[in-house]
Image (spheres, rainbow, N blue to C red):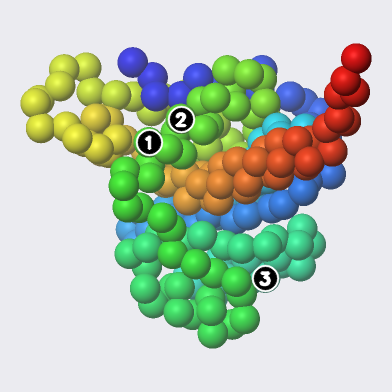
Amino acid sequence: GLVFSYKPQMTPDPFVLPRLSRIYGGIDIGTSSPTCLLLCGLDDAGAMWVFKEYYQRRANMHDWMRVVGEWTEEYRVQTWFIDSAADLELAAMQAAGFDARPSIKQNDAAVTAVNFLNSKMTRKQFWLSPECPNLKAELLTYQYKEIAEGFEKTFIDKVKPNQRDHAIDALRYATLPLAAQQYTQQQQVEITFGAHRPLMRAS
């Protein structure tokens, strides 16, 4: 079955971007396959908005880093998360002065990101810009294996091989820190609420 609970109505037109509390970028590097850059963030209500996409086959590093610079300045991107296997590209971004970090992959991080995304989608808290057509196409077609082969342990083992997932990977890289941020915010709200709870008077 399909991996994501995405529905076309989650891409409204017109698409009006609200004020976002934090914005992260995800980067999946391709050589003969496409390189994808995505921007996403959370609004004050906790909804997730994915609103910019760069998707280019055989992309030149100079070209996509120019886009990184433009988007960082225009949207005040806090941090870029890039495929952890892209050592040279990560070093180049850091040398250029960007806050760039390797993607989180340990402890089957992919399944954590997918679960976070699906929770947003099922609660109608996920919105995708029409400017992200390749991510939309991938979300609509990305599937699990029909029959398990018996060795599957991680999320990557469980999905069909050789699917288009360049935009999905970029989205996953940017999603994990957003999930962590929202969890931290929820804890802060609970702590603050508890600290200011009025005392009960004895009768």
Q: Position of residue 127 (x, y in %)?
A: 68, 30
Residue picked out by circle 2: 115
Q: Position of residue 15 (x, y in %)?
A: 78, 32
Q: Is residue 48 above or below residue 77?
A: above
- The dot on residue 111 is 1
What quarter of the picture does the N terminus occupy? top left
Q: Of tags 1 and 3, which is closer to the observer?
A: 1
Furthest residue toward bottom: 95
Residue picked out by circle 3: 69
Number of on-image labels = 3
The quarter of the picture where residue 164 lies is: top left
Q: Residues within 10 Å of mark 2 (few under 14, many from 20)?
A: some
The quarter of the picture where residue 99 lies is: bottom right
CA gap between label 2 and label 1 equals 6 Å
Q: Disc 1, disc 3: CB below 8 Å?
A: no
CA gap between label 1 and label 3 equals 30 Å
Q: Secondary structure at mark 3?
A: helix
Q: Disc 2, disc 1: CB below 8 Å?
A: yes
In this rendered view, identify the residue nearer to me: 149 or 128: 149
In this rendered view, identify the residue nearer to me: 117 or 131: 117
CA gap between label 2 and label 3 equals 30 Å
What amino acid is at disc 1? Val
